[in-house]
Image (cartoon, rainbow, N blue to C red):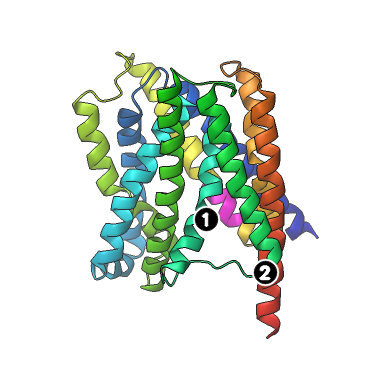
Amino acid sequence: MKVALFGLLWALAFVILESTQFVFFGGLFQRMSSFLFGFLVFGIIAVAFIGWAAITAPAQLKAAIANPRPLIAANVAVVFAVSAYLLSVQMIEPAITYTISGGVMPITAYIAYRLGVAEGEPMRNTMEAIGNTLLFAGVVYLAVITIGGWSGFVRGDAGVAALGVLLAIVDGVMFTWVLIFCQRLDRAGVGPGAVFGLRFPLYVLFAGGFAALGFDHKGALPLADMAVMVALGLVLTVPPLYALQRAIASVSTLTIGTLTALGPFVIFALQMIEGRVAYSTATLAGLGLFFVGALLASFGAVNATVSEQRQ
């Protein structure tokens, strides 16, 4: 009982921390270059995790180097995924970026399956198919209201809104491929900590170069302010992943999926508290559609997994 309770608390911590991350980044990148932020935060993460792996598990780094194709592919996918995420979250509502990105991922996994990718995921039963169809409908609906001007925030005109939506889609698609390539590294004997650090070096170089060229520059920031922002960025980036890993070890996939589906509502509430994003009934309706789809897809996925285990 205690194990399940702690697992539930870890899952809730993941949802709250990740939701806070989206809202914080959305506000932060009105003042600070997302590329400079990404260079500093993910540079520190890469050095820390790769350095720790080099000390504690050097064989894992050798295994990664011996498998250059998934390693390079993961790095390239991360460049697009992280860049798209950090740009989208400052252009449109953070809740909409989160929801569109999350809704695109199972669709991408299904397309990968249809293309013959081993790590792709089929629709294993009617409930899962209906759930993912509703997720797709939610993505389309949120894209339409954002571009049409009915959401709570767009940093510009309809063109900026369309770009923000497109970047959220790119984030979801490319992050799915990040997971696929990281699964291949895991099967090659590279542990999760090493994989986490090894997927960022190319992005760090990319972000550093773009920051040096002045892309997405918002003006000079005092070093003290920048240090605080980077520290908060680290706190909101690494602990959610740890919390998710602890939750996975203690509670069911369905429980985690259900709580994760609440993420858009948590972000929506935090947006209202922050005050930068206006309240939008249209956005809330889209989040509700996503939630129903996510629940059905989660139930369908769990039922399929249980059926497979019984065979």
| Image coordinates for residue 43, horizontal then vertical, percent | 31, 40
Q: Is residue 116 magenta?
A: no
Q: Residue at x 44, y 63 (%)?
A: 112
Mark 2 — residue?
A: 125
Answer with left or right where residue 309 lies relative to residue 159: right
Region of the chain picked out in magenta, as a range: 241-246
Circle 2 Cα neighbour tier, 10 Å, few/some/many (<14 / 14–19 / ≥20): few
Q: Is residue 245 magenta?
A: yes
Q: How far apart are the alpha carbons under marks 2 and 1?
A: 15 Å
Kindly state the secondary structure of the residue where label 1 is placed: helix
Q: Nearer the viewer, residue 55 or 1?
A: 1
Tell which circle, 2 or 1, labels the residue nearer the N-terminal end: 1
Q: Residue 62 lies in what quarter of the image?
A: bottom left
| Image coordinates for residue 166, horizontal then vertical, percent | 42, 37
Mark 1 — residue?
A: 107
Answer with left or right where residue 273 lies relative to residue 234: right
Q: Quadrant of the C terminus?
A: bottom right
Q: Residue at x 63, y 37 (%)?
A: 264
Circle 1 Cα neighbour tier, 10 Å, few/some/many (<14 / 14–19 / ≥20): many
Amino acid at pointer 1:
Ile
Q: Is residue 205 above or below residue 157?
A: below
Kindly state the secondary structure of the residue where label 2 is placed: loop
